[in-house]
Amino acid sequence: MKVLLIGSGGREHALAWKLAKSPRLTKLFAAPGNPGMAECATLVALDVDDHAAVSAFCRDNGVTFVVVGPEAPLVAGIADRLRADGLEVFGPSAAAAQLEGSKGFTKDLCAKYDIPTGAYRRFTDAAAAKAYVQAEGAPIVIKADGLAAGKGVTVAMALPEALAAIDDCFDGAFGAAGAEVVVEAFLDGEEASFFCLCDGTNALPLASAQDHKRVGDGDTGPNTGGMGAYSPAPVMTPEMVERTMKEIIEPTIRGMAADGHPFSGVLFAGLMITEKGPELIEYNVRFGDPECQVLMMRLQSDLLALLHAAATGTLDQVNASWKDETALTVVLASKGYPASYDKNTPIDFIPADGDATKVFHAGTALKDGKLVATGGRVLNATAVAPTVADAQAAAYALADAVKWDNGFCRRDIGWRAVAREKA
Ligand code: AMP
Ligand code: GLY
């Protein structure tokens, strides 16, 4: 099978690396890809916003299956266009991608199908939103409705912060994404990410992970796209997984189909494990980044077969098997991230792959034959080992072997699970 993978981050490098191991693969293209992905894919300089050009590339190069990594092209309808042109696509339609593209859409679905989530209201004007927040009191959560690159959420521990966040949204801090605001009850508990493949009708549970969103050690400082992750998340016990499937994932799949937009692709549930059990914080319609990197390190099955089954309505015919070990990834980011940072800083050395270690590329590029950092999140030092503590030690040894003067990382990725392991 000839496959085109869309995207250029650490998530897509991990997907490419795993897809390349499939005996069914005859050729892997990546658009636009990154220098790390060039080890296992042919990079193509396609404008992925130009859906007609992507479709024409597939036709001209014998590609029959397209795997879409990031959410933006999905929300923009790339899967619809490619399917209409006769291609098989891993990733939801634009209508189903609303699960990530509109927080209000997801909250309404939860209300309709009795899926546990924080109580909420949707607003299109600041005065009404503020009156509601004042009546509810803090802590409370303010969310821009649309895609805001992970920055549209304010968990306000006090009222002034909540009121300011409402003004920010309606004053245009998140552009069109903030034209509608969702105000949501604060959920208290431990967060976990849970991933399932879906084919419109069936859901196949994959695995759990925990991300580290804040930039600083001890979960301090501003939010980022994610500074490190590990899988599995100990808080997702077999009982919690079963409840999540029954109370959250399965009603979502049934509800989406009943409402006329069946979901296929990967459903990434951001969960809060509260005293009552799992509650939905949000859905994403793609793999997490950097959660995907740790999932791929643990996956033993043929990724191409799994993604293709999701795309073709045959998920009931496949199984996913996983290493019992823990995988852990440390994100190396440009100094200054998530605020402004220098670009094109030289990366002098990246360790080669080991049996249980791998450095994935995210924001890297080749300039005059030299590897440079061009993004905020740049490399993911990833390791798999029998215990969390061993995976953590191996991932940091790998991160510390990278020679890149302008890079930094958190030093405590996995702290929660390491503490549990010691207890
Ligand atoms: P999101 O972009 O929706 O993932 O939200 C970013 C982060 O805000 C989440 O990972 C949570 O840590 C936090 N968050 C979002 N909604 C809630 C909520 N209702 N209660 C507590 N924390 C929340
Ligand atoms: N790491 C969080 C995300 O991909 O949304």
Image (spheres, rainbow, N blue to C red):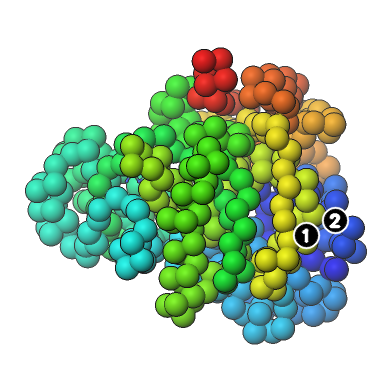
Residue on which disc 1 sits: 304
Q: Position of residue 6 (x, y in %)?
A: 69, 61
Residue 380 picture quarter: top right
Q: Residue at x 72, y 83 (%)?
A: 86
In the rendered picture of this protein, how many numbered marks are placed on residues?
2
Q: Residue at x 52, y 46 (%)?
A: 241
The local crowd at label 1, few if under 14, some if 14 to 19, many if 20 or more residues have their Cα within 10 Å, is many
Q: Mark 2 belongs to which amino acid?
A: Ser
Q: Position of residue 53 (x, y in %)?
A: 70, 76
Question: Does residue 35 sit above or below 196 in this rendering?
Answer: above
Q: Is residue 382 visible?
A: no
Tell me if 331 is positioned left or right of 58 in this view.
Answer: left
Question: Does residue 96 sit above or below 318 in this rendering?
Answer: below
The disc at residue 22 is 2
Q: Are marks 1 and 2 in contact (CB under 8 Å)?
A: yes
Q: Residue at x 22, y 38 (%)?
A: 139
Tell me if 379 is positioned left or right of 412 in this view.
Answer: right
Q: CA distance from mark 1 to mark 2?
A: 6 Å
Does the beta carbon at disc 1 come under 8 Å from ligand 2?
Answer: no
